[in-house]
Amino acid sequence: MDGALGPRSAVKVSAQVQADSFVALVVERALRLDVGGMTCAACSASVERLVQATDLVERVSVNLPLERASLVLREGADLAQVIAAIERGGFTAQPAIDPSERRRASEREVRQQGRTVGAALVLAVLCMLLTMPMGGMGLPPLGHLGPTLNVEGGGHGALAPEGVVLNHVVALVLGLMVWLGLGYRFHTGALASLRRRSANMDVLVSMGSSTAMLWSLAVVFGGLLGHVVGDGTVFIDGGAAIIAFLLLGDHLEARAKLQATDAVHALMSLRPDEAWRVDDGTPHGSTTAVPLEEIAAGDMIRVRPGEVVPLDGVLVGNRVLLDMASLTGEPYPVSVEEGDEVHGGTSPVDAVLHLRVTQPAGKGLLDRVISLVEAAQEGTAPVQRLVDRISSIFVPVVATAAVLAATGWWITGAGSTTVMLVLVSTLVIACPCALGLATPTALVVGTGMGARFGILVKGIEDLERSVHIDTVVLDKTGTITEGRPRIANIELLRGDIPGLLALADDLEQDSTHPIADAIRWSRANFDLPAPGVTERRVVGGKGVRGLLDGRDVGVGNLAMMDDVGCTVPDDVRATLSERAETGVGLVLVGDQEGLLGWVELRDSLRPSSVEAIRRLKSEGLEVVMLTGDRDGTARRVADEVGIATVVAEVLPDAKVEEVIRLQSEGRCVAMVGDGINDAAALAAAELGVAMGGGAGIALDAAGVVLLKDDLMDVLGAIGLGRATMSRIRTNLGWAFGYNIVGIPLAMGLLYPWTGWLLPPAFAAAAMSLSSLSVVGNSLTLRWWKPRRWEV
């Protein structure tokens, strides 16, 4: 009897993942702290040192863009002592608040920053207009103060023969408002940094702006007392512009950081605060809106079309089309039927959905996805550790270089204006911020975008390794194929088909094996009572046997037929051998009287397998099939999907040996699988990719989990790693290149030939632009999409 048997089953995404087996998403419960006051990589490194110095933690990782510290306390350690150590270092720290509340607080802070920036820019522009010469855009003199001064010609800057120009006095007052009022946090941050015997960006900003403003104060007050300081040039506009531009840069950077976390915030926003609980637990009962925390496993909830499913559960009632785009990126609604699992964050499209809750609030798939993404975003790349070491000495080196450059120009006879320009501009232009933001901002955006499309990355190390992958090893069953075999043909020797299926189903009734599911699936077509098999016993490697009306019966392979005394003629054995060569799976059913017949099973290819493997090969990747199935079956599937290299009939330990063999040949291997027998190979490969519907141990061993059981996402995972690491390399190249070029220019490299020196205001603007360029480049990852979405 040809053709698959059984009711039409719903298409399932790995959104079928069982909550209690999704080990990959059970992230170690590290404690998280919200840390304030960090401005650059030197700050995040300082926080790590402060925490490590307490000797109270096993490990600690600090993420600058997220302003978060993740730590694991030693047994018996007190978190309050760790927080106190951080606060003694001049930072703020508190146990991490709810991410949504933190997001709202950050948005309020950004709005407040915007108002501060507006005031600073207005005052800085006024300072510039008041201190510029009249021949340019400057305002005419408002008058003069103090005694006459012995200055040549019309005087310079703030000083004239008639006394101190009143414009500059007004500009000084406005500049002091910017320097000390709006820019106070730079100075307090610098003092805190120096107290903990380190130096961060605040030190450079405070030194640069303070040098400009204090020099200007000396010039103005000296003039009021009848003394000429230097040549009378002031840097009020430069000092104010430094603070204003840095505040503007910080504001734009804060907004960009919020955008960097948009993907995770979008996942968080999928969690409603309330659900409609059905009072009497039946689909037709009345409902009451209750907070999610009050709903327990076993309760029934109702979700109307267009509403978001709040909790994980199983469908009760008729078939429903489910929009899973927000959770897995699946572009088309998925059909789910009664008894199928439904996850929070999805939405019914065409009908009211009734759900029997299986996981309480905070324990669902969506919550674990968010936890996994947050944990991945807190990781530190090896290259970032090098950057942190550079940042720890960066500020002292730059400050020393600025003083030496200014001293050198003074020794060569340069005027005070030249010396001051070199000193202030060199201090201000140096930017450790860009170095600190280069890696984590790209990581935050990249992992967030992966989660948006159902590609969960456990750590940045996995992203880094994905760049070098040249060989992709694919398990067959459940990876290339659906992993759900269906009966394609039944050969009957005696009796009838319903009776054969009923007997096989009765023997297999306690089995969860996919073959038993296939038999059960087909037997559901016939309304026939169970034969009444007793004394069932599983025989390893053979099948299941039992008793029916006093005679031995069995289902399994030829060895099982021999065990129950079922004679299989030689011609039937030959036929079975021929059928096996075609790649089908054979399950025999018989009793002491002889063979009843057999069923032939085929495991269908996943819809995307052929195209996914073609694209992997087009990317220059070698694709290998690794399976425990018979060689004939494996090669038939390999021919269908276009794989040339097949390693078949391998045991689980041989799978890991094959991965190691490929690595010994210099290959960088990505292993893709879903079963317990794939776990060791997944762990051994440079990149382990687990299909989300697989076994928990496989998910735990993998570095990447695909929520949607789609091989196209393997290509997407590799592409995401390449795109993220490309941004990180570009960011680091820009950050280092900017400092390598900018600092010498500020020190006056071109002055002997061009007479040009970099004004402090330009240096401050360039410094802010450096950080913004790094964050902006990372934000371009928000346009990334897996290859399956490209048209």
Image (cartoon, rainbow, N blue to C red):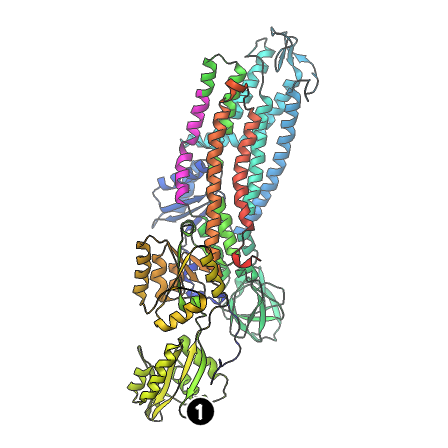
Q: Which residue is mark 1?
A: 496
Q: Is residue 497 above or below residue 195?
A: below
- The residue under the point 56% across, 43% down is 256
Percent of width and height locating residue 166 = 66, 16
Q: Amino acid at mark 1?
A: Asp
Magenta residue check for 623: no
Percent of width and height locating residue 122 = 65, 30
Q: Is residue 449 above or below residue 226?
A: below
Res. 573 image quadrant: bottom left
Which quadrant is home to the C terminus? bottom right
Of 769 and 320, the residue lying toward us = 769
Does residue 400 appear in the picture of this structure? yes
Specify few, some or many for label 1: CA neighbours under 10 Å numbering under 14, 14-19, or 20 or more: few
Res. 90 image quadrant: top left
* Range shown magenta: 380-404
- Predominant SS of the magenta segment: helix
Of 364 and 628, the residue lying toward us = 628
Does residue 707 appear in the picture of this structure? no
Query: How many labels were placed on the picture?
Result: 1
In the image, taking residue 320 as reference, residue 412 lies left or right, namely left
Percent of width and height locating residue 411 = 45, 13
Q: Is residue 69 above or below residue 413?
A: below
Percent of width and height locating residue 449 = 52, 53
In the image, taking residue 110 as reference, residue 86 lies left or right, namely left
Of 67 and 673, the residue lying toward us = 673
In the image, taking residue 642 as reference, residue 106 lies left or right, namely right
Q: Secondary structure at mark 1?
A: loop
Q: Is residue 4 above or below residue 21?
A: below
Magenta residue check for 386: yes
